[in-house]
Structure formats: structure tokens, C-alpha cells
Image (cartoon, rainbow, N blue to C red):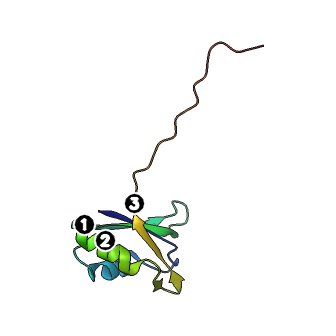
Amino acid sequence: MKLLIRNLARVTTETDLQDLFEGYGIVQSCNLVLDKETGKSKGFAFVEMPKQGEAKAAMKNLNGTVVDDNIIRVKKSEPKVKQKEPSVSPYRRA
């Protein structure tokens, strides 16, 4: 299960998150999202845990906890929905 972690302090690292979530089970991957220009954290990350029960336990127990002086939010990551481009008619009303 892929989890979205929001409201992370800019000083929180992938290693910090990995260690935190491994307290609830196996962590398949941990991806802290970084700003392309500055290389600094954008304040959110994704953690993948292969066992759904472990992921749910992590989500339930870590949501609302304090990490590096910030109250983090943990929820199930939903697939990104692409927005449709507006259809443009070749016929325009005058």
C-alpha cells in the first residue's frame, strides 16, 4: 500500500521516515519529494509498504504525531487523476 505523508518539516530525511515506518513493518520504498531547483524537501513524501495490515497500522498510529516539531498527516495515496484538456471545437460562435 502506498502512503502519502504530508506536513513534514524541511529537516526530515528519507532515513528518518524509513526508520519511523519500519516500526510498523517492512518498508518497500520511501520517496521524499524534493524541489528540482533547490534540492530541498517540499514537505511531503510517499512510503510504500507491501503488507496492507502493516501499512494500515502505520497510518492509524502515525497520523497526527509530531515529527521534527511538525504534526504529520498520513493517509492512503490515491492515484493521480489527469485533468481532461478542454475540447476545442473548430466551429466558433460569432
Name the residue rendered at 49%, 80% in the picture: 11
Looking at the image, which residue is at 47% across and 80% down? 64
Residue with the mark numbered 2: 56
Residue 60 point in image, percent of width and height: 37, 76
10 Å neighbourhood of mark 2: few (<14), some, or many (≥20)? some
- 47 sits left or right of 91 in the view: left
| Residue at screen point 36% across, 65% down | 3
Disc number placed over residue 52 in the picture, else none: 1
Above or below 87: residue 38: below
Q: Residues within 10 Å of mark 1 (few under 14, many from 20)?
A: few
Asked if the residues shown at circle 3 and circle 2 are in contact, with their CB atoms under 8 angstroms apart, the answer is: no
Give me the C-alpha separation between circle 3 and circle 1.
13 Å
Q: Position of residue 84 (x, y in %)?
A: 52, 35
Q: Which residue is mark 3?
A: 77
Residue 50: image location, x then y, percent: 22, 65
* Depth order, front residue of 74/90: 74
Q: Mark 2 touching mark 1, by CB under 8 A? A: yes
Mark 1: amino acid: Gln
Task: Give the CA distance from mark 2 to mark 1.
Answer: 6 Å
Q: Is residue 67 above or below residue 4?
A: below
Give the quadrant of the C terminus.
top right
- The picture quadrant where one finds residue 59 is bottom left
